[in-house]
Image (spheres, rainbow, N blue to C red):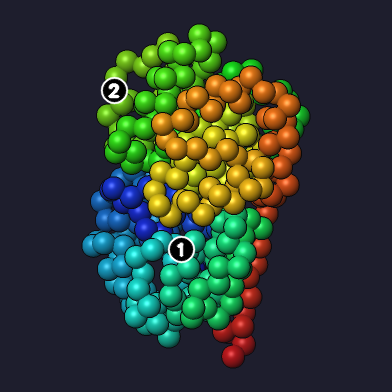
Amino acid sequence: MTPRALLAADCGRGVGLGHLERMLALADALDPDVDVSMLVPQGDVAIRQRVVDRGHAPLEASGDTPARVAAVAGDSTPFDVVVLDGYVFDVALQHRLRDRAPLSVVDDLRLPTDCDLAVNPSPGGETLRPEGAGGFLGGADYALIRASVVQARELGLRRDRDPRTVLVSTGATDPAGLGRSVSHSLLERDPDVKVTRVVGPDSLDIAERAWAREQLLQAPPDLADGLATATVYVGAAGTTAVQAACVGCPAVITPAVSNQAAQAAALEAAGCAVVVDATYLADTCLALLDDLARRAEMAVRGRALVDGCGAARVADAIRHLVAARAAS
């Protein structure tokens, strides 16, 4: 009988797509020998469609993320394993879930937990085992990256990148309009640069007339093609920054939210990214566009840090959890 897994990411209006993307990458790696249900907010058409487009089964529930998890995991139909990704799941909820099935928690903040397996998939997370974890996997070796990005890594090695193309992504919410500001600064200051700017599913920018040499992508399925062809990635130090390292796209990043600071520092320490204050993103990008040797070295270091096999490694660990519980 095929094991059943519930994957629950903190997602929905006002929340970025990073947690969801990590769970989708894990769902891809668990397929086809684990039957995955992806928990999504009731009535959120965009997120539901994102899950369907990736070939997975959405499971809708109402309420905030912890309420959705509590309602579905407490249903009469049991799951063989539950995986949570986010910062909103308290220890009491985790304890109740763990009584019913093996529990894995993906978290890069080292929050207290009550789980069978904690995963910190961020570069620099190797030693950040949280209190209350039965087992632990941490660091860039466990970065949850989807297969298309790994394929883009190989594509990027086989062909030249566009000479002055910048991929700008500052998060799905970007309330301060940082992405727009950086993009327009680059376009104003360099007549040869081209920008591909990523905007979130609720962004109003897509209705505006784009600048010449600027392409807008609204909540694209992934950024694999963009990372494979861009000269530089500029933006937030979140999930896309780790994907950029894997593909070998040099990055200029800033912690868009406080929890990205440690990952940003680790990427810079590895030599594949430059971390700057948000006000210097455009300046630093323009300098890097003119430094071919430095970009080449950064690309090598990024690919060495993030090999793209992290989702498969975490999926194997989750299969072992299921097998161990079944044998006990």
- Mark 1 neighbour class, 10 Å CA radius: few under 14, some 14 to 19, many 20 or more: some
Q: Amino acid at mark 1?
A: Leu
Graded by Cα atoms within 10 Å as few (under 14), some (14 to 19) or many (20 or more), the crowding at tag 2 reads few
Q: Residue 148: name its quadrant.
A: top right
Corner quadrant of residue 61: bottom left
Residue at x-position 66% and y-position 62% = 313
- Which of the 4 image quarters holds residue 99? bottom left
For residue 207, the mark is 2
Quadrant (top left/top right/bottom left/bottom right) for the C terminus = bottom right
Considering every residue shown, the one lying at the far left of the view is 63
The answer to whether residue 283 shows anywhere in this view is: yes
The residue lying at 31 percent from left, 73 percent from top is: 70
Q: Is residue 210 above or below residue 77?
A: above
Looking at the image, residue 7 lies above or below residue 79: above
Q: Name the residue beneath numbered marker 1.
A: 109
Mark 1: secondary structure: loop
Q: Nearer the viewer, residue 69 or 111?
A: 111
